[in-house]
Amino acid sequence: MKKKLLPILMGALLVPTVWADVRIEAERSVVGENDVLEARLRFPAQDRGDLYVAAIVQGNLLFFGEDGKLHSAPVPYKRDGLFDQGQAETILRFPGVLITPGRYRLYAAITDTGADIFDTSRWHGPLARQLFIVNEPPERSRDFDGDGWPDDDGNHDGFSDADHDFDGWRDDDADHNGIPDGEESGGDDQGGADHSGHDHGGDDDGGHDDGGNTGTGDTGGNVATGASLYGANCSGCHSPDPASDRKGVLMGADPARIRGAIASNKGGMGFLADVLSDADIQAISDFIRSKRGG
């Protein structure tokens, strides 16, 4: 079930939030050890239905249940609730010192009572969203003025204005270290093994990727399979066309890079460990390589 819902959720995030049936409010998005992470729900108009609240934690999509527990399967936070205009409810309050450093995405939506959450036509509005950046230094959180919000977060939802796919990272931060690619020093990333050796001139491109058993074998059918898998699992964050190289997707021409990103949960990719097999990853890699042009 999680395999189906996460792409739906990510796609729904790309819908401009002009209005919403429920909002998430916070005093701050950037939370340090001496701060408190607090989130409230507020209802701008009276509504009735099933209220869902979910979070992505270490790549896992978890739902807040009526029993006060987190669930991996979709369950309402409140079933057939009646929500008054202006009503507010605190749903999270934790001292920052108790939270593992990282980025935590929180979502909320109201559906028709008893509706299938997979049917977005039954949602009463787009997803409310809020990103919390916990115990990260300013060079990563981008909160240089210390006001509790990234300096490039104009609407105070926690997401950078340059994070158009709402994955919690700027689109120009391919390695997800919090620093825009253009601001990084010219060390290993610019002229070291990663770009002049491993990726472009090393064994992977001249051997394994292009001349080994994955570059010259069953690429015909594998590319077609990879295109389908890429569209379902990768295009939301990396754009439908890998040739754009959004967020460094062309590095996926090496399947080891994809496996490594999933294993390290880079950009919240950890959930794909339960979705993609080694053969699937190889097919996606072949598709990306076909778009790279060599």
Image (cartoon, grey):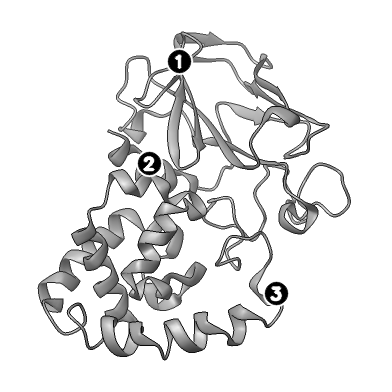
Query: Across the whole image, how many numbered discs are drawn on residues?
Result: 3
Q: Residue at x 47, y 53 (%)?
A: 264
- 160 left or right of 124? right
Q: Which is nearer the eye, 204 or 123?
A: 204
Q: Earlier in the sequence, mark 1 or mark 3?
A: 1
Q: Which is nearer the eye, 247 or 126?
A: 247
Identify the residue under disc 2: 6
Residue 184, numbered circle = 3
Residue 225, numbered circle = none
Task: Give the quarter of the image for residue 103.
Answer: top right
Q: CA distance from mark 3 to mark 2?
A: 31 Å
Q: Residue at x 77, y 36 (%)?
A: 28
The type of residue carrying mark 2 is: Leu
Residue 165 lies, in percent from the top left, at 51, 55
Residue 24 lies, in percent from the top left, at 64, 29
Q: Earlier in the sequence, mark 1 or mark 2?
A: 2
Task: Give the quarter of the image for residue 173.
Answer: bottom right
Identify the residue under disc 1: 65
Q: Residue at x 42, y 65 (%)?
A: 239
Residue 253 lies, in percent from the top left, at 34, 75
The type of residue carrying mark 1 is: Gly
The type of residue carrying mark 3 is: Glu
